[in-house]
Image (spheres, rainbow, N blue to C red):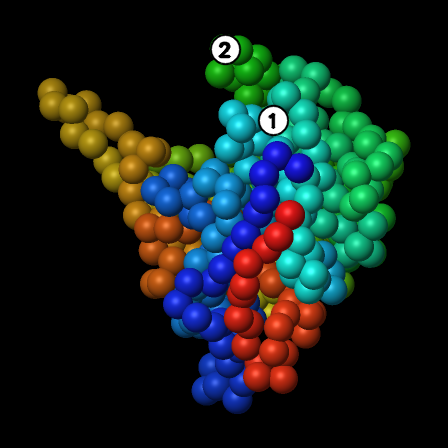
Amino acid sequence: MKQALRYTVLGGMLILLVGSVEADRIGTLSFASFPRSPDLYLVDSTGKNFRKLTTDHIHKGSPTWSPDGRFFAYHSNDDGDPDIYVVDVRNKTSRQLINHPERDLSPAWSPNGKWIAFESDRTGDLHIYRINVDGSNLMQLTKRGDNQNPAWSPDSQWIAYNSYQDGNRDAGIRGRHFLSVMTADGKRSKQLAEGPNMSGCTWSPDGKQIAFAAGNIGVEGVNIIVIDVNRRNRRNLTRIGANAWARYPAWSPDGEWIAYFFKALPVLDLGLGHRVIDIWSGDSVIYVTNSEGENDGQPLEATRGVSSSPVWVPEGFFRVSPQPQLLSTQWGQLKK
């Protein structure tokens, strides 16, 4: 372990709302703030009870939770390259799951609790790997192209991911973009959909659909799209406009909602009739929308300016936290 780890929820307690007037949309989201303040945060799905979940690691991202809520993992690049860490909520301990000189990013905990999938460029290209939660039995699952953003099926038998084929990363060319799925051992794979600027994917809780992000900036924008796992019934969940992107969808455990990262992209006037879209600036916020796509959803204003890819927190998190009978969590110090 490179260093001791501690974490607190600033401001005291995280209160779980029960009996709220918005109880049909109650749940808790976690996310990493980027780029202004790289911290981890919690907020309920109505935009209330916003709290910072801090650790001794300064640079961190991509939180993911064990299905029982007892553990969460994330990547941190405090030492110059991202590695993956796991925190035990009940015992208030932490450990480094992966330590490699190249980048290890975007951990995703399997619903059966056994594995964590992640992406790494340790071989040059970005590939998806699987490792046991105790750090044993590392497996490389993808072999070709660049592959990112692993997302487990509810039965832990499949992994969806964004695949970039026939590109040249050194020249900044990503080639063709696909939503792909593969078996948990990586031995079989298939492409479900193609589209530009793929960025994130998520399974419906019944395992029948996958939501993903794709689209052209300056044309229709990057939108959240839903497709059946048999490649049928592809439909846009959002229609956000040309100069914006909606990325990194996350399907709620009850199947009713999809959270996603939204950013409006400013258009810069360079003079002489030249205008460009500035993808590095703009106002970011997490949205939550009905999974049927009745509208583009509602922003969680507490996350504006400090948001990135959202992840739903399992209900078990509140059961293994201190003082569960009070429906709240008081975070203390983690020891090595």
- State the count of labels: 2
Residue annotated with mark 2: 171
Quarter of the figure with the N terminus: top right
Q: Can residue 205 be seen from the camera position used here? A: no
Relative to 226, residue 60 above or below = above
- Expressed as whole percent of the image width and height from the top left, the position of residue 186 reads 83, 33
Q: Is residue 123 left or right of residue 37?
A: right
Q: Is residue 281 left or right of residue 227?
A: left
Quarter occupied by residue 245: top left
Question: Which residue is drawn at the image coordinates 29% and 32% (left, top)?
Answer: 277
The disc labelled 2 sits on which kind of residue? Ala
| Front-lying residue, 297 or 4 | 4
Residue annotated with mark 1: 103
Relative to 112, residue 221 above or below = above
Q: Residues within 10 Å of mark 2 (few under 14, many from 20)?
A: few
| Front-lying residue, 41 or 193 | 41
